[in-house]
Image (cartoon, grey):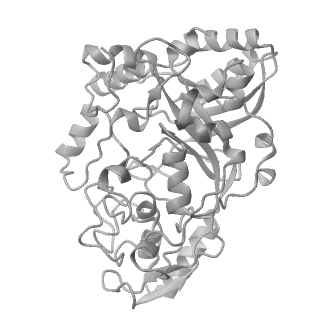
Amino acid sequence: MAVDLRETNIDPTRPEYRRMLDNLQSNILKPHGRQESDHLFLRFTARQDGVRTWIGGFARREVTSARKQLEETNGFHDHGTRGGLVAGFALSAKGYQALGLVPQDFGGSGQAFRNGMKHRAFSLIARNRDPLPAEWETSYHGDIHALVSLANDSADALQAKTQEVSETLRGIADVLTVERGTVLRNAKGEPIEHFGYIDARSQPLFLKGEIDRETEAGVDAWDPSAPLGLVLIDDPFTNEEDSFGSFLVFRKLQQDVAGFNAGVKALATSLSTDEALAGALVVGRFKDGTPVTQRPWDGLGAVNNFTYLPQDRVGNRCPFHAHIRKANQRGANPALNDEEERSRRIVRRGIPYGVRPPVDEKGLLFLCFQSDIARQFEFIQRAWVDNPNFPEFLLLRGLNTGDDALIGQHPRASQKWPRQWGQSGRFLGRTTFNFGGYVRLRGGEYFFAPSLSFLKNL
């Protein structure tokens, strides 16, 4: 029986999901949880048959299936047994062409993928404000064919595996660059990013165990569940049943930590408030994860049980331009019904870089999975994040929300901030302040993480 992509709350122990999990790569339905990761960007140099042979061998030896990942996760929870290497492989549209395959076979959901990140079309609502590709790091200037992802809890073991894989690629592909990611944690051991805020707390969930844990934690105002079709599509290059893959967006995002902290201080002065609240108004959460829509100080932790309606309808607790509200309106989107809004969500798998010396630059290796890049990632980025008139232009023309205060790229998008938490109206009690420019794209590409049945049979 073929898996229905409309399903959610998946019990991976049930036999009907075994083939899907055997054929699906890891880190898509659930994060792999490793402390260290390397991302190798490749440009093929060998003939098609040589490249195909290498990919097939690498997939059979190294690429981790979703089922193996879940078995190792259960082993850790039950016995404290840590898993070892997690490996993944993804191809760009140029990579498929280099293998003699036609990216048009992805159909309508693959249009943005076929264009590639360097050739993103302009949006009618909000133009792409990212730096031009010529301004990216040189490693990302030319064609990128593939991404090899390696992850391990041991930095030494990961370095050795990266060296080993690089050696096997001699004569097959040039390794354009290797991006090292390392999980940052706060004093409680929770993952954070370089600005100090808890990261990836609210994610679409597909597996029964994860959804049950949210329910047990009292999450009832917000439904974190998602259908498999939010992230998976049929792999067009294999006929094996229940063989799915997912589109992968990679973006290297540089973070100006000193500039951000100075900006938060200046915003706090402008609003006559403390820096902790000013930063929470930028992000939408305090550093410990407390949603600013819930209270004007921290202490709740990274709870996920909140929405913006009815208690914050005008954005006087969590501003409309706060990062987590721009990117996910939690049922408050004025233009989309709840089902349409939820269908735009992405599955984030980012990890900080620049944690280990001698690297001075700091930032985030942003990765996200989805079933349609244009409908999900690009729509969020253009129609919501970089659109200074969303969502308030839909409520009252000319009010002007401003762009996303954390990651927005619009150069003229001063935001309107509540002068007093919870009491400023939509028209009065707002202060104009242009916050942003502390996150900058340094390079990236669009990929597809194919099914293992495709990779192993190349």
Q: Nearer the viewer, residue 82 or 62?
A: 62
Q: Is residue 97 above or below residue 240?
A: below
What residue is drawn where x is 41% and y is 86%?
Answer: 419
What residue is drawn where x is 26% and y is 67%?
Answer: 309
Q: Quadrant of the C terminus?
A: top right
Q: Is residue 357 visible?
A: no
Q: Position of residue 130 (x, y in %)?
A: 67, 58
Name the side, left or right, on which 139 lies relative to 344. right
Q: Is residue 322 above or below residue 52?
A: below
The residue at the far bottom in this view is 428
Q: Nearer the viewer, residue 274 or 87?
A: 87
What residue is drawn where x is 28% and y is 37%?
Answer: 210
Q: Position of residue 4 (x, y in %)?
A: 32, 26
Q: Is residue 59 visible?
A: yes
Q: Quadrant of the N terminus?
A: top left
Count of all numbered marks drawn on residues in the image: 0
Q: Nearer the viewer, residue 160 or 226?
A: 226
Q: Position of residue 275 (x, y in %)?
A: 47, 76
Q: Is residue 165 above or below residue 206?
A: above
**Quadrant of residue 205 within the rendered picture:** top left
Q: Position of residue 271 (x, y in %)?
A: 46, 86
